Amino acid sequence: MRTAPTARIRLQSQVLSTDEVMFPAIRNWLILLLPFFLLLGCGGKPEKEVPDVRTQFKIAMEKYNRGKYLDAQEEFQRLIFNYPGESLADTAQYYLAMSYYKDKEYALAAGEFQRLLSAFPASEFTEAGHYHLAMTHYKRSPKYSLDQSSTYEAVEQFALYLDAFGEGEFADSSRLKLGELRNKLARKAYRNGIIYMKVGDYVAAIVYFDYLLQEFPGTDWAQSAQYQKGECYRKQKSWERAKSAYMEAIDGYSRSEHTRKAEERLSELKQEHPEIFTSEG
């Protein structure tokens, strides 16, 4: 039997009315459940647990002791960042600096050692930090003919170490390094003096020799500078000053080749200009 048109329209109206009620309800439930599904989706990737300070330090030291200095730097930096107030902070700072030092990143190491000394002045690593800060500049010191900024910085830092820790663990090494660096700076000054002598600028040459004698008197180049100073005065025909310079080259130093040369020059001066020796009888 066929349904009357009026009945079909009524039935469709009822169906539409039911859909209009059901769909909004389902949609609302889906909206409410959406955060839950999102949480479930993220549940498979839990946040990485941060290790405690001693575990983190152990990880960093294992990297350091195995010579994996780049990895050690990252681990020590992580410890310092996550646990800035912990008792191991100064230890981590020291070994961070040493990681750079061992990796021959001396400029970066210098910054980290300086940070250790500034932030933790009472640390048990203060002495070692002072010494290795000086060593970072020592390692960067070039040959004598080049710019000596790093050498001067190393000299200053070794001197500061010795002032603070004159009988310390690294005192003997610091004195040796300091002597070596002073010799290098003296050689630089001596070389500059010789260069000016070669071009006939004896005034400038004397300035360099005097600088060497004043700043680096106990170095291997001091007697040579004193003798060459006499040579400059001789070239200027300043006989009295030449005599004094030669005499100082003899009297103030152990006997050497320059002693013999100075004696020869004095003998020549005595023959050529005896008047400058009359007061000595």
Image (cartoon, helix red, strand yellow):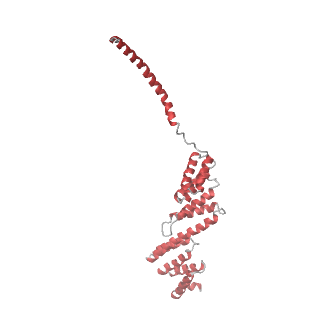
| Relative vertical location of residue 115 with respect to residue 12 in this rendering, above or below | below
Q: Position of residue 219 (x, y in %)?
A: 57, 72
Residue farthest to the front?
A: 1
Visible in this render: residue 130? yes
Identified at 43% across, 19% down, the residue is 21
Q: Nearer the viewer, residue 113 or 53?
A: 53
Instruction: Mark yes or no: residue 117 visible.
Output: no
Asked if residue 110 lies left or right of residue 20, the reply is right
194 or 267: which is nearer to us?
A: 194
In the picture as drawn, the residue positioned furthest to the right comes out as 167
The x and y percentages for residue 215 are 55, 69
Q: Position of residue 90 (x, y in %)?
A: 61, 51
Q: Residue at x 62, y 47 (%)?
A: 55
Name the outermost residue toward the left. 5
Residue 186 screen position, x and y as percent: 53, 71
For the C terminus, the quadrant is bottom right
Closest to the observer: 96 or 250? 96
Residue 170 found in image quarter: bottom right
Can you say whether 122 is above or below 183 in the image? Answer: above
